[in-house]
Amino acid sequence: MKLKVAVIGAGVVGASIARVLSMYENFDVVLLDREPDVGWGASKANTSVIHPGHEEDPGEHPVRARLCVEGNRLWRKWVEELDIPARWPGELMLFYSEEEAQRAARYVELARLNGVPGVRMVWEEVKQIEPWVNPGAVGAVYAPTAGLVSPFEAVAAIVENAVENGVRLLAETEVRGVRVSGGEVCGVETSRGFVEADLVVNAAGLHADRVSHMAGVELDFRIKPRRGEYLLFDENVHVKPRMILHPVPTPVTKGVYAVTTVHGNLMLGPTADDLPEEEKDNLSTTEEGLSRVMEEGSRLLREVPPRDRVIRFFAGLRPEPPRGEWLIKAYDDPWGFVNVAGIRSPGLTAAPAIAGYVLELIAGEYDVRLSRKPSWNPYRVGVTSVRGKSPEEVDQLVKANPDYGAIVCRCRLVSKAEIVETVERMRRIGLERVTVDGVKFRTTAGTGWCQGQFCRWGIALIISQATGTPLHEVTVKRAGYGVGDVKVLLRGGSSC
């Protein structure tokens, strides 16, 4: 008998759980999210680092430490299987004094305890390893297994693969209650009606505490939003650290990072500011926070580009649980409820390993004898891009499809063919609303110097033509593309 599973939250953790469960005949999986698209929560705005695992104390957080190290290893396989943009440059934890060096040495020992390979102290050679290091740094902890991915593209790829393997996605579906009968879960109440389920997996990110309370468990568990602000620079700035740079962590945060993203932009951030519980959707940025990012970035780098080379500043929210403890637990009261809550950093890194851990919990707690699908397909191929191709390769693409020669986003060199294919893929996974932002995050169209000022209308027009949605109703940032009186006039109304 198949168990019906409702996974709440289509971020990187929920999507990874859905993908892993889709490997088995035992489960009929539905993935729910309140947003119009996948990965629009904490997964969308983060530092994109795949941590090595040497910053996790196995004595204090044993599960977190183990899953971080395992996740780093699994991502190497997943990015290959799913064609996710990634690179593995390694990282330097910089220190600026003997006192900081003593604190940093602890992470070499944690690496040994966690089985993280190659971690060592470097001193004068740090400037040869990474020429962009600030001259004030006296040394660093070098961790060669650190990596970078494109977080949103990772979530989209995971969901595409999960859906191909039988998972059903329900976006724009807010969970409003967990129905329990006779001590057992029987489904979830949503904004779109009741969804029957034998198992409910709560991976709702910042709102996982509320979902847990709906099931009547962990009533004292509270998640606070921790805001991190970032600066993203034009890809043409000459400051491009090869490696991931950051300071010695504090008890609150790993600190501001300096990275060159997989798409070639210098990015600095994040800050770490705890907000009130009721501000779980507050993505505002502050002058103080952004100034702090610039200041901290100048400690890491020998040169920071001027602020007029910043093309975007933004904030992300991380779910911070009590004492930093991840809450991953399968319950027998009510039977069938599984918490995967409070997954703060290094949640992105650990996501594939968390998914495997949840599978083990379900199999053990609910006596499921797992049967692997012989037809399960681990592979997904990304959208073909003209960016980075040779002129000869582009010619071949254009001969096969002239839309590859129609460049919609000139900053990022994204063609009409790529956008059309992306729209088709979004509809294929079950998105009822194809958004400009969803296309942007999947293709990078609109993320360059002009931030979509020249190409946004072209993207919206392609979406309109492909979906039959009136142009002014195409969604940009959760609202219609029409603005003010323009929207009123297009609808045939009056602004008077």
Image: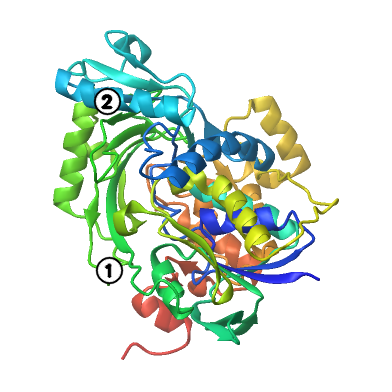
Report whether residue 240 is seen: no
Could you say which is closer to the camera, residue 96 or residue 434? 96
Residue lying at 42% horizontally and 43% vertically, measured from the top left: 448
Which residue in the protein does label 1 denote? 279
From the top left corner, tell me how far across and down residue 175 is, in percent: 50, 78
* Few, some or many residues within 10 Å of mark 1 (<14, 14–19, 20+): some
Pick whichever, 386 or 208, lies toward us.
208
Residue type at mark 1 is Glu
Comparing 131 with 18, the one in front is: 18
Q: With 463 as the anchor, is 344 left or right in this view?
A: left
Q: Which residue does the image show at 15% across and 23% down from the upper left?
A: 99
First-in-chain label (2 vs 1)? 2
Q: Secondary structure at mark 1?
A: loop
> Is the N terminus in the top left, top right, bottom left or bottom right quadrant?
bottom right
The residue type indicated by label 2 comes to Ala
Q: Residue at x 23, y 33 (%)?
A: 297
Q: Are marks 2 and 1 in contact (CB under 8 Å)?
A: no
Q: Which mark is residue 194?
A: none
Determine the residue located farthest toward the right in the rendered image: 374
How far is disc 2 from disc 1 in space, using C-alphas? 34 Å
Residue 104 numbered mark, or none: 2
Q: Is residue 33 shown above or below 300?
A: below
In this rendering, the answer to whether 406 lies above or below 109 is below
Establish if 397 lies above or below 5.
above
